[in-house]
Image (spheres, rainbow, N blue to C red):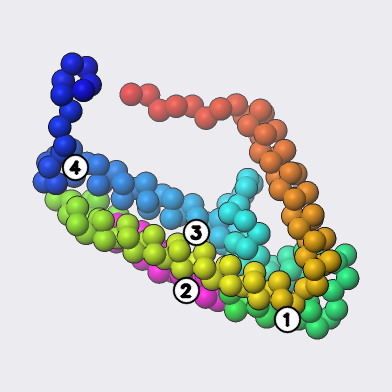
Amino acid sequence: MRNGVAATEPKLGSTFAVRLVAASVLVVAAAGTALSARAQGMEGHGPRPGAGMMMFGGSPEHMGRGIDRMLDGLGVTDAQRAQIKQIAMAAAADLKAQREAGRALREKGMQIFVAPSVDAASAESVRQQMQALHDQSSKRVLQAMLDASKVLTPEQRAKLGERMKERRAVMEDRMKRMQNEHGPRPQPQK
């Protein structure tokens, strides 16, 4: 009950349900765009969705330099370095295709939203496809990381894990400083 009025379940064809689905499509599209941008390394500052996404996004030359920096100081051999680069490049190619599929789904979701009549079933179908695509991307990153873990020794992985913790702490500190400098985001007026 809200404001003395009994709440009722919205019917699928009701205006409320259509607006809810349309808003959901926008949220999913925005989240997909943000994740895609982060996966590609296009977003400026701030936390990214894990080392896997950072390692497998961007151009081959940027990836190569990033992988070299990641492996520097770990005592890896040239053979290990080459194997890890090969794993990362293969994963990056797969993830690029998945990002392109995600762009097509976001466009399809936007077309559903701006149509004269929003089709709730189509919107839900796009949401499910986007969810499956995100799951597929996550699995591909995990597989690449597992493949890379077989190339590195336990000691090398431990050193890399420490480096990643330190980097995460630096990034979190940077985000806090940026928030303090710029203040909280203004809330939209109603």
Q: Residue at x 73, y 65 (%)?
A: 66
Q: Disc 3 or 2, which lies upstream in sequence?
A: 3
The amino acid marked with disc number 1 is Gln
Q: Position of residue 44 (x, y in %)?
A: 62, 49
Which residue bears the numbered disc 3?
Answer: 36
- In this rendering, would 106 be left or right of 91? left
Q: Is residue 179 left or right of residue 161?
A: left
Rendering coords of residue 111 (x, y %): 26, 57
> What kind of element bears circle 1?
helix
Task: Give the residue at the far bottom of this rendering.
Answer: 79
In the displayed image of the protein, which residue is found farthest to the top?
4
Which dot, 2 or 1, sits closer to the camera?
A: 1
Q: Position of residue 176 (x, y in %)?
A: 67, 34
> Is label 1 in contact with label 3 (beta carbons under 8 Å)?
no
Give the residue type at disc 3. Ser
Sequence order check, earlier mark of 2 and 1:
1
The residue wearing badge 4 is 17
Kind of element beneath mark 2: helix
* In the displayed structure image, the side of residue 103 where residue 108 appears, left or right: left
Identify the residue at horizontal 69%, vertical 41% (top origin): 172
Mark 2 and mark 1: Cα distance apart in space: 22 Å
Q: Which residue is mark 2?
A: 97
